[in-house]
Image (tube, helix red, strand yellow):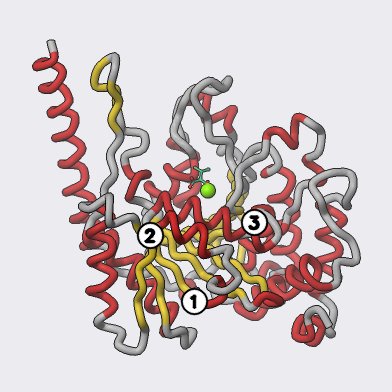
């Protein structure tokens, strides 16, 4: 019996490895980056998401349309509504992303995506794969870039989370070998590690930052994390002005909240799952996961989203209108910067910091103790249009 099971497992494992060889070949062939300046018009796809996503994505679109009104009027930028990425439709079609929806997504250049519900064992949905993870894989969005800034504490971090490999690559391809045993896989490839590490170093170089921190558990997970770490040290040799230090993920979660250390870190590069975990911690320090945005960047497409989920509990308790739209609005700013509107992006980011960290004339708490997302969006817009924004942002708390 067990011999048969082993043979079956070997067969499945063989098919998985074959897939990965194909994937590596594709990564090596895909060298060209899209040039947004050449696209006329730039098409922004809007996926509203589930739960609070449906509410906060609308607020983000309000801000985007506001700052892009001239470009929209001139036809340089258009929005495309993608309605089908809902948990109901995905469950009906039993697909993480239904084929027609994926085609619509691919017809756009960049996507603004609200949080989508990820089914889990035991809930009412079929246990299909997460739409985020599937989209990252289908569009090869290999870089998950997550900035976290707390100016009053001197914290200015940028996380480069590898977004298509690691523990996530085969997350939906693990299997039960027998009644008593389940196996998942973790994969790190050389070109997969190299492209994200290179992006982190390029970011450091462009921003005059002389340090990059790689986070692994390479002392224990020797093959995959070991490769990630070795690749980082290899790439680092090409950047003699930038130092590279390696931290293990466990101590990193502690040092991130150690005031004696935290502001020394600037640029982080990490495998997928560690990036997932550490960026939630970082976002909490900035004011909560509701304040953090996330860019998922590939060579052909890019997708921008909140770092948090769809918060079904908030919807059930009737609190969705009080959800903080800052995460999606910050994601919109990242989208703008990515397609070539750094001025508008900066204004939005400054307004988010003035409203959320300094002035705090009104506050959003996620409950009726604070304002609604719509009121908060209006507050942000009033600062985005305020000629004193830059000055107010510079003086910060004073
Ligand atoms: C994130 C989220 C996703 C992830 C979930 C929703 C699949 O937590 O974007 O960080 O784990 O990557
Ligand atoms: Mg996460």
Q: Nearer the viewer, mark 2 or mark 3?
A: 2
Given residues 156 and 144, the one toward you in this image is: 156
Judge from the rendering whether residue 129 lies leftward or rightward of residue 89; answer left or right: left
Percent coordinates x, y for residue 149 in the rendering:
63, 71
State the residue at coordinates (58%, 36%).
Answer: 117
Q: CA distance from mark 1 to mark 2?
A: 40 Å
Q: For the residue carrying disc 1, how many other residues have a C-alpha within 10 Å: few (<14), some (14-19), or many (20+)?
A: few
Among the 4 quarters of the image, the one containing residue 7: top left
Task: Please determine whether, in this image, residue 58 is positioned above or below residue 282.
Answer: above
User: In screen coordinates, is 351 left or right of 309?
Assistant: right
* Rendered image quadrant of residue 151: bottom right
Q: CA distance from mark 3 to mark 1?
A: 35 Å
Say what secondary structure mark 3 lies in.
helix
Q: Which mark is residue 284?
A: 3
* Left/right of residue 308 with respect to residue 382 in the rendered view: left
Picture mark count: 3
Graded by Cα atoms within 10 Å as few (under 14), some (14 to 19) or many (20 or more), the crowding at tag 3 reads some
- Mark 1 or mark 2: name the one nearer the start of the chain: 1
Q: Residues within 10 Å of mark 2 (few under 14, many from 20)?
A: some
Tell me what residue is drawn at x 16 percent, y 48 percent: 21
For residue 286, say whether it is visible.
yes
Circle 1 is placed at which residue position? Answer: 37
Report the residue marked by disc 2: 248
Earlier in the chain: of badge 2 and badge 3, it is 2
Left of 17 or right of it: where is 48?
A: right
């Amino acid at each position: 019996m067990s011999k048969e099971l082993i043979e079956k497992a070997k067969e499945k494992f063989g098919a998985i490895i074959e897939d990965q060889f194909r994937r590596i070949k594709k990564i090596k062939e895909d060298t060209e980056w899209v040039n947004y300046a050449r696209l006329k018009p730039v098409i922004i796809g809007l996926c509203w998401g589930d739960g609070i996503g449906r509410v906060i994505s609308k607020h983000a679109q309000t801000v985007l349309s506001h700052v892009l009104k001239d470009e929209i009027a001139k036809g340089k930028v258009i929005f495309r509504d993608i309605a089908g990425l809902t948990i109901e439709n995905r469950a009906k079609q039993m697909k993480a992303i239904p084929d027609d929806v994926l085609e619509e997504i691919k017809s756009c250049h960049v996507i603004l995506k609200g949080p989508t519900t990820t089914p889990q064992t035991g809930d009412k949905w079929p246990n299909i794969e997460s739409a985020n993870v599937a989209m990252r894989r289908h569009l090869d969005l290999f870089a998950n870039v997550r900035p976290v800034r707390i100016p009053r504490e001197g914290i200015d971090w940028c996380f480069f989370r590898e977004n298509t490999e690691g523990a996530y690559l085969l997350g939906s391809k693990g299997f039960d070998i027998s009644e008593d045993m389940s196996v998942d896989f973790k994969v790190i490839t050389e070109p997969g590690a190299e492209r994200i590490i290179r992006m982190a170093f390029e970011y450091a170089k462009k921003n005059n930052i002389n340090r990059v921190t790689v986070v692994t558990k390479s002392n224990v997970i020797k093959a995959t994390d070991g490769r990630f770490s070795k690749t980082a040290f290899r790439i680092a040799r090409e950047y003699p002005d930038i130092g590279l230090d390696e931290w293990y993920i466990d101590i990193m979660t502690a040092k991130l909240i150690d005031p004696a250390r935290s502001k020394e870190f600037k640029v982080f590069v990490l495998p997928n799952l560690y990036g997932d975990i550490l960026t939630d911690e970082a976002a909490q320090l900035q004011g909560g996961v509701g304040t953090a945005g996330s860019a998922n960047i590939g060579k052909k497409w890019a997708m921008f989203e909140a770092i948090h989920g769809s918060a079904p509990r908030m919807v059930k308790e009737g609190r969705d209108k009080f959800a903080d739209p800052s995460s999606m609005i910050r994601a919109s700013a990242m989208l703008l910067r990515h397609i070539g509107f750094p001025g508008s992006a900066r204004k939005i980011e400054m307004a988010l910091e003035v409203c959320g960290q300094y002035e705090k004339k009104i506050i959003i708490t996620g409950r009726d103790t604070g304002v609604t997302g719509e009121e908060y969006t209006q507050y942000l817009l009033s600062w985005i249009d305020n000629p004193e924004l830059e000055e107010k942002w510079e003086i910060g708390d004073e």
